[in-house]
Amino acid sequence: MDVRVEDQIVINKLQAYSSADDSYWSFKGRSTRKHCHALIQYPAMMVPQMQGELIDAIQSVDSNITTVFDPFVGSGTTMGESMMRGLDFVGHDINPLAILACEVKSGPLYVRKLDEKIISVLGFIEQNNVSEVAVSFKGIDKWFLPEVQLELSTIYIAIKAEPSKWARKIFWLALSNTVRSTCNSRSSTYKLHIKSEEQIEKIGSAKNIFKKNLLKSFENIKAQKAMLAEKGYLNRSKGIGQVTIKNVDAKLRKKSKLKFDLLVSSPPYGDNSTTVTYGQFSYLPLQWIDLTDINENIDSSMLSYQNAIDSSSLGGSLKESKDKRLKLINRSSSLEKCIEKILKVNPDNIKKLISFVYDLDLSLKNAIEELRENAYMIWTLGNRRISDIEVPLDRIMRELLESRGCTYVYEIERTIPSKRMASRNQIASTMGKESVLIMRR
């Protein structure tokens, strides 16, 4: 089959990078998180510089790209790089904390007003000490020392008193980072695991940590605004690209009327209960945030227990795995071969894999329908292990997409210099490599 001219140009461009340096795509020493990319520590974040260069490569052959779509937006790496190119952006995610991060990054960037509001909120926090804990949830005494609860409550009340919602969101995001630092859960894992008594004794002042986080956020927002202005993509205090962020489930959402020009995303590498537990990571911070500031229609059951978000995510339900397997069996030979291997070692573990891939496929169907004809897709993927057998997610994704009429263009394999992945969650050996799969609708 003849390769489309535009596809060949993309292939040549990407090959040229690695022909000069075979470790080019590892971005070792070139991966930094500045301006909006430094506003939150979030699990398994993509490399901003890599996503930016991939967008540039596709734009060089498709000049009609105006809107980028990310169905698993996470902390908004793709969004930040899209904004820095003056592009419109649409991002979806099931996790409210991801939505908050993206909404803060998308602006408005009222730097002068923000400076005044930070002085005000920090002044209130410094001068006041509440005597009652402002929030209540199951396990609060397990995860927070009494004095930390009171300091976080003072911060919570100070933020609630701020009249401007755009400023409150910035404050909530800084508070989310503070909660992660002052809770009794270990920072070495995304799952909730209690720290040692010695570590708990070393937990610092929530007020001091919040102040440090908020002032750092201010510097990053200021840098983001300056960079957008320098590139000519700032209109008053917002990027010129229109940004739309929705708190929705990738496998269930309804189609939009718009057709997007480019998809750039990184789906979960496996079900959230056993790989990167985005929900558990977000559970404690979200307890200290007024969720109506993120989404007025938010389902409160999403925080009813620490695994609720992960259970609603891809692969969260293990029901009807036999029927799900039958629906996938002729769609991906790589999946079927992997299932057979796992069956010989641990039959119980195939349910996790089947449920995850089934939900992923539903998400892919929705995502493809959102794209215009010949739109490119850039998927950053990692192959995790189940029962010590590698799951070839890159091949499975390619086969699922091809079964839905998409065309394979190119694949990059990259070494990950350092990335906190499943090994920190005591599930599998560290993922040392990622794949970037480029497809076309």
Image (cartoon, helix red, strand yellow):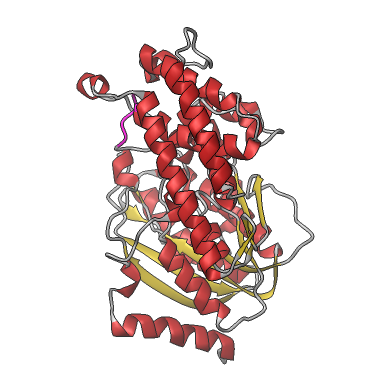
Residue at the image position 76 percent from the left and 63 percent from the top:
258
Picture quadrant where residue 86 is located:
bottom right
Magenta includes 185?
A: yes
Name the image quarter holding the N terminus.
bottom right
Toward the viewer: 72 or 116? 116
Residue 407 visible somewhere in the drawing: yes
Residue at the image position 39 percent from the left and 58 percent from the top:
383
Q: Residue furthest top?
A: 131
From the image, give the main secondary structure of the stretch colored magenta.
loop
Q: Work out whether 405 lies above or below 330.
A: below
Where is residue 271? Give x, y as percent: 47, 45
Q: Work out whether 11 lies above or below 146.
A: below
Say whether residue 64 is left or right of residue 61.
Answer: right
Say whether residue 405 is left or right of residue 126.
Answer: right
Where is residue 8? Give x, y as percent: 51, 88
Name the image quarter holding the C terminus.
bottom right
Q: Residue furthest right?
A: 257
Toward the viewer: 300 or 352? 300
Q: Work out whether 5 lies above or below 65.
A: below
Toward the viewer: 176 or 23? 176
Residue at the image position 46 percent from the left and 55 percent from the top:
223
Picture quadrant where residue 211 is located:
top left
Residue 310 visible somewhere in the drawing: no
Where is residue 257? Give x, y as percent: 79, 60
Magenta includes 374?
A: no
Q: Please give the count of numbered marks on the rendered protein.
A: 0
Say whether residue 313 is left or right of residue 126.
Answer: right
Where is residue 181? Give x, y as percent: 35, 31
Q: Which residues are magenta?
A: 182-187
